[in-house]
Protein backbone atom coordinates (compact mmCIF):
# COMPACT_ATOMS: atom_id res chain seq x y z
CA UNK A 1 0.00 0.00 0.00
CA UNK A 2 2.69 2.56 0.76
CA UNK A 3 4.12 1.79 -2.65
CA UNK A 4 0.84 2.67 -4.37
CA UNK A 5 0.50 6.00 -2.52
CA UNK A 6 4.00 6.94 -3.38
CA UNK A 7 3.36 6.33 -7.03
CA UNK A 8 0.30 8.59 -6.99
CA UNK A 9 2.18 11.60 -5.49
CA UNK A 10 3.33 14.22 -8.06
CA UNK A 11 7.01 14.15 -8.91
CA UNK A 12 9.17 17.23 -8.39
CA UNK A 13 10.98 17.47 -11.74
CA UNK A 14 12.18 21.12 -11.69
CA UNK A 15 14.73 22.16 -9.09
CA UNK A 16 14.34 25.50 -7.33
CA UNK A 17 17.31 27.01 -9.15
CA UNK A 18 15.66 26.50 -12.56
CA UNK A 19 12.48 28.18 -11.32
CA UNK A 20 14.45 31.19 -10.08
CA UNK A 21 16.29 31.43 -13.39
CA UNK A 22 13.00 31.54 -15.29
CA UNK A 23 11.67 34.29 -13.01
CA UNK A 24 14.83 36.31 -13.57
CA UNK A 25 14.53 35.95 -17.34
CA UNK A 26 10.91 37.09 -17.21
CA UNK A 27 11.86 40.17 -15.19
CA UNK A 28 14.57 41.10 -17.69
CA UNK A 29 12.17 40.63 -20.60
CA UNK A 30 9.59 42.87 -18.92
CA UNK A 31 12.05 45.62 -18.10
CA UNK A 32 12.78 44.93 -14.52
CA UNK A 33 9.25 44.16 -13.51
CA UNK A 34 7.74 47.40 -14.86
CA UNK A 35 5.39 47.28 -17.81
CA UNK A 36 7.25 48.39 -20.90
CA UNK A 37 5.91 51.63 -22.37
CA UNK A 38 4.55 51.26 -25.89
CA UNK A 39 6.96 52.48 -28.51
CA UNK A 40 6.03 55.91 -29.87
CA UNK A 41 7.17 57.48 -33.09
CA UNK A 42 9.06 60.74 -32.66
CA UNK A 43 6.96 63.79 -33.40
CA UNK A 44 7.83 65.28 -36.77
CA UNK A 45 9.67 68.58 -36.60
CA UNK A 46 7.53 71.54 -37.41
CA UNK A 47 8.00 72.49 -41.03
CA UNK A 48 9.64 75.84 -41.50
CA UNK A 49 7.19 78.46 -42.66
CA UNK A 50 7.67 79.31 -46.29
CA UNK A 51 8.59 82.94 -46.79
CA UNK A 52 5.70 85.13 -47.87
CA UNK A 53 5.96 86.52 -51.34
CA UNK A 54 6.80 90.18 -51.26
CA UNK A 55 4.06 92.10 -52.99
CA UNK A 56 5.52 95.54 -52.26
CA UNK A 57 8.03 95.09 -55.08
CA UNK A 58 5.46 94.10 -57.68
CA UNK A 59 4.93 96.78 -60.38
CA UNK A 60 1.72 98.72 -59.95
CA UNK A 61 -0.14 101.57 -61.59
CA UNK A 62 1.37 104.66 -59.96
CA UNK A 63 -0.79 107.54 -58.85
CA UNK A 64 -0.39 110.68 -60.93
CA UNK A 65 -0.73 113.87 -58.90
CA UNK A 66 -0.93 116.40 -61.71
CA UNK A 67 -0.18 117.11 -65.34
CA UNK A 68 0.85 120.02 -67.50
CA UNK A 69 0.91 120.27 -71.28
CA UNK A 70 2.32 122.32 -74.12
CA UNK A 71 -1.21 123.05 -75.29
CA UNK A 72 -4.82 122.00 -74.71
CA UNK A 73 -7.67 122.19 -77.19
CA UNK A 74 -10.00 123.36 -74.43
CA UNK A 75 -10.79 122.81 -70.76
CA UNK A 76 -12.92 119.83 -71.78
CA UNK A 77 -9.84 118.17 -73.30
CA UNK A 78 -7.23 119.22 -70.74
CA UNK A 79 -4.11 117.31 -69.70
CA UNK A 80 -5.90 116.09 -66.54
CA UNK A 81 -8.23 114.06 -68.76
CA UNK A 82 -5.30 111.84 -69.79
CA UNK A 83 -5.26 110.08 -66.41
CA UNK A 84 -8.84 110.33 -65.12
CA UNK A 85 -9.36 106.56 -65.40
CA UNK A 86 -11.95 106.82 -68.17
CA UNK A 87 -11.76 105.70 -71.79
CA UNK A 88 -15.43 106.46 -72.47
CA UNK A 89 -16.79 108.99 -74.91
CA UNK A 90 -14.28 111.56 -76.16
CA UNK A 91 -12.48 112.05 -72.87
CA UNK A 92 -8.74 112.55 -73.05
CA UNK A 93 -6.03 115.13 -73.67
CA UNK A 94 -6.21 116.84 -77.08
CA UNK A 95 -3.45 119.13 -78.32
CA UNK A 96 -4.11 122.46 -79.99
CA UNK A 97 -2.05 121.51 -83.06
CA UNK A 98 -0.81 118.41 -84.88
CA UNK A 99 2.77 119.66 -84.90
CA UNK A 100 5.63 117.47 -83.56
CA UNK A 101 6.95 118.66 -80.22
CA UNK A 102 3.65 118.82 -78.36
CA UNK A 103 4.13 117.36 -74.89
CA UNK A 104 2.42 116.37 -71.65
CA UNK A 105 4.25 116.37 -68.33
CA UNK A 106 3.06 113.87 -65.66
CA UNK A 107 4.02 114.34 -62.00
CA UNK A 108 3.77 111.27 -59.79
CA UNK A 109 2.45 111.43 -56.23
CA UNK A 110 5.75 109.95 -55.04
CA UNK A 111 9.11 109.02 -56.45
CA UNK A 112 9.18 105.59 -58.05
CA UNK A 113 11.13 103.21 -60.22
CA UNK A 114 9.20 103.43 -63.48
CA UNK A 115 9.28 100.20 -65.48
CA UNK A 116 6.55 100.52 -68.12
CA UNK A 117 3.61 102.51 -69.39
CA UNK A 118 0.17 101.71 -70.74
CA UNK A 119 -1.43 103.97 -73.33
CA UNK A 120 -5.00 103.74 -74.61
CA UNK A 121 -5.99 104.63 -78.16
CA UNK A 122 -9.67 105.15 -78.92
CA UNK A 123 -11.31 103.60 -81.96
CA UNK A 124 -12.78 105.96 -84.53
CA UNK A 125 -11.09 109.02 -83.04
CA UNK A 126 -11.19 111.89 -85.53
CA UNK A 127 -7.87 113.22 -84.19
CA UNK A 128 -4.34 111.98 -84.88
CA UNK A 129 -2.75 109.30 -82.71
CA UNK A 130 0.80 109.14 -81.39
CA UNK A 131 3.16 107.00 -83.50
CA UNK A 132 6.46 107.80 -81.78
CA UNK A 133 7.34 109.77 -78.68
CA UNK A 134 10.32 110.57 -76.49
CA UNK A 135 9.99 110.10 -72.74
CA UNK A 136 12.01 112.53 -70.63
CA UNK A 137 12.53 111.74 -66.94
CA UNK A 138 13.45 113.89 -63.92
CA UNK A 139 17.16 113.10 -64.24
CA UNK A 140 17.19 114.26 -67.88
CA UNK A 141 17.45 110.74 -69.33
CA UNK A 142 15.36 109.88 -72.37
CA UNK A 143 13.75 106.80 -73.92
CA UNK A 144 11.94 106.49 -77.23
CA UNK A 145 8.66 104.58 -77.54
CA UNK A 146 6.56 103.53 -80.54
CA UNK A 147 2.82 102.97 -80.60
CA UNK A 148 0.78 101.00 -83.13
CA UNK A 149 -2.30 102.44 -84.80
CA UNK A 150 -4.72 100.12 -83.04
CA UNK A 151 -7.60 100.36 -80.63
CA UNK A 152 -7.24 99.67 -76.92
CA UNK A 153 -4.42 99.47 -74.40
CA UNK A 154 -0.82 99.15 -75.50
CA UNK A 155 1.86 98.02 -73.04
CA UNK A 156 5.12 99.89 -73.42
CA UNK A 157 8.11 98.30 -71.62
CA UNK A 158 10.86 100.66 -70.46
CA UNK A 159 14.35 100.51 -69.05
CA UNK A 160 13.70 101.01 -65.29
CA UNK A 161 14.39 104.56 -64.17
CA UNK A 162 13.97 106.35 -60.82
CA UNK A 163 11.90 109.47 -61.31
CA UNK A 164 9.09 111.69 -60.06
CA UNK A 165 8.07 113.01 -63.48
CA UNK A 166 7.52 111.65 -66.96
CA UNK A 167 7.27 113.97 -69.96
CA UNK A 168 5.84 112.54 -73.18
CA UNK A 169 7.11 114.51 -76.17
CA UNK A 170 5.27 113.62 -79.40
CA UNK A 171 7.73 113.04 -82.26
CA UNK A 172 5.39 111.72 -84.96
CA UNK A 173 1.76 110.74 -85.50
CA UNK A 174 -0.31 108.18 -87.37
CA UNK A 175 -2.12 110.01 -90.11
CA UNK A 176 -5.39 108.43 -91.16
CA UNK A 177 -8.22 109.45 -93.44
CA UNK A 178 -10.68 109.96 -90.60
CA UNK A 179 -8.82 112.96 -89.16
CA UNK A 180 -11.18 115.91 -89.13
CA UNK A 181 -10.04 117.44 -85.85
CA UNK A 182 -6.67 119.22 -86.18
CA UNK A 183 -5.37 117.74 -82.94
CA UNK A 184 -3.44 114.84 -81.42
CA UNK A 185 -5.36 112.71 -78.91
CA UNK A 186 -4.05 110.89 -75.86
CA UNK A 187 -7.08 109.12 -74.40
CA UNK A 188 -5.53 107.60 -71.28
CA UNK A 189 -2.05 106.88 -69.92
CA UNK A 190 -0.85 104.81 -66.97
CA UNK A 191 2.65 104.82 -65.48
CA UNK A 192 3.71 101.50 -63.94
CA UNK A 193 6.48 100.81 -61.45
CA UNK A 194 7.32 100.49 -57.76
CA UNK A 195 7.36 103.41 -55.31
CA UNK A 196 10.78 104.10 -53.84
CA UNK A 197 11.11 104.28 -50.05
CA UNK A 198 12.87 107.15 -48.35
Image (cartoon, grey):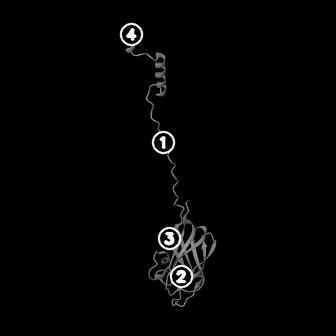
Residue with the mark numbered 4: 3
Marks 3/4: CA–CA distance: 125 Å
Relative to the observer, which residue lies in front, 149 or 76?
A: 149
Q: Quadrant of residue 88?
A: bottom left
**Up-down: is 96 above or below 13?**
below
Q: Which mark is residue 65?
A: 3
Q: Earlier in the sequence, mark 3 or mark 4?
A: 4
Q: Position of residue 12 (x, y in %)?
A: 43, 16
Marks 2/3: CA–CA distance: 28 Å
Residue with the mark numbered 2: 150
- Judging from the image, what secondary structure is the residue with disc 2 in? loop
> Badge 3, how many Cα within 10 Å: few under 14, some, many 20+?
few
Q: Position of residue 97 (x, y in %)?
A: 55, 86
What residue is at 52 percent from the left and 86 percent from the top? 127
Q: Mark 3 or 4, which is nearer the eye?
A: 4
Residue with the mark numbered 1: 43
What residue is at 37 percent from the left and 8 percent from the top? 2
Marks 1/4: CA–CA distance: 69 Å
Q: Earlier in the sequence, mark 4 or mark 2?
A: 4
Q: Quadrant of residue 193?
A: bottom right
Q: Quadrant of the C terminus?
A: bottom right
Amino acid sequence: MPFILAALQPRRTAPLSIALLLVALLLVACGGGEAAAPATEPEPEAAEAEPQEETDNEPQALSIASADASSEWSESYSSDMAFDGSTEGWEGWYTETMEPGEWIDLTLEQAATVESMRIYTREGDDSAHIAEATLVFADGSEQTIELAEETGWQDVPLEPVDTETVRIVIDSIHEHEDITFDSIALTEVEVWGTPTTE
